[in-house]
Image: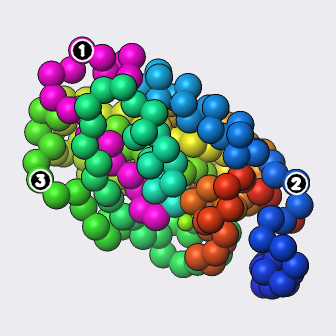
Amino acid sequence: MPDAVSSRLRSTRRTPGRALISSERIGRRVRQIGHEVSEVYADIDTPLVLVAILKGATVFAADLLRSLSIPAELEFVRAASYGAGTRTTGRVKIAHMVEGPLVGRHVLLVEDIVDSGRTIDTILKRFRKLRPASLRVAALLDRPARREIAVQIDFTGFVIPDRFVIGYGLDYAGLYRELPGIYALS
Ligand code: IMP
Ligand code: MG
């Protein structure tokens, strides 16, 4: 089924039907989150460290960064979960870590979607060991239906139903990240 869907989407048009969340709605919500984040961190005395979780969160992180009215640095972390497909298989490892110390820094992890919670949980555990002054999570999407590990999300874009989604950085088999809106795979 996923391969059939995939080739159908590629062969017809790049936008698979009606968006679950339009690019306009995403834009408005990301600007709101940027405003909230800027208020929460208004009084910190070092630049915020925005850490985008590769690769899916890069599009969200780029827009969020430009919605901030406070100084911020940009870093990247890469988590690899074993296996491919539309479900997280279980074990998650960190494949690329941020450069430089985070001791005493205010860190905001930026994720595209929190699904089982395993990816963000693994990254949070690793980052806590680096003794940041604060550690929070901004997730564009929250899909609570498949949660296996409870995680606190400090800034949430949209809570979505139990559908696999693509677009705005989110991929299926490496494709569709370029779509400006978010679409559900049927
Ligand atoms: P978790 O570890 O199960 O919470 O999964 C989070 C990671 O799985 C995200 O960083 C995404 O890369 C990927 N992921 C989960 N659900 C989707 C989806 O619906 N579309 C695309 N990627 C997803
Ligand atoms: Mg992915």
Q: Secondary structure at mark 3?
A: loop
Place of residue 144 in the rendered image (x, y in percent of width and height, measured from the top left) = 66, 42
Nearest the eye: 31 or 159: 31
Q: Secondary structure at mark 2?
A: loop
181 is within the stretch colored magenta: no
Give the residue type at disc 2.
Answer: Arg
47 is within the stretch colored magenta: yes
**First reached walking from the N terminus: tag 1 or tag 2:** 2
In this picture, which residue range is highlighted in magenta?
38-55
Label 3 crowd (10 A; few <14 / some 14-19 / many >=20): few
Q: Secondary structure at mark 1?
A: loop
Residue at mark 1: 43
Give the residue type at disc 1.
Answer: Asp
Place of residue 100 in the rendered image (x, y in percent of width and height, measured from the top left) = 11, 53
- Please indicate, yes or no, whether residue 143 appears anywhere in the rendered image: yes
Q: Tell whether 184 sits left or right of 56.
A: right
In the displayed structure, 19 sits above or below 105; it is: below
- Please indicate, yes or no, whether residue 149 appears anywhere in the rendered image: no
In the displayed structure, 6 sits above or below 66; it is: below
Residue at mark 3: 100
In the displayed structure, 25 sits above or below 38; it is: below
Classify mark 3 as within 8 Å of ligand 1 or not, answering yes or no.
no
Place of residue 107 in the rendered image (x, y in percent of width and height, measured from the top left) = 28, 37
Nearest the eye: 17 or 151: 17
Q: Residue at x 71, y 40 (%)?
A: 24
In the displayed structure, 18 sits above or below 69; it is: below
Q: Residue at x 80, y 65 (%)?
A: 15
Rendered image coloring scheme: rainbow
Disc 2 from disc 3: Cα separation: 43 Å
Mark sitting on residue 18? 2
Which quadrant does the N terminus fall into? bottom right
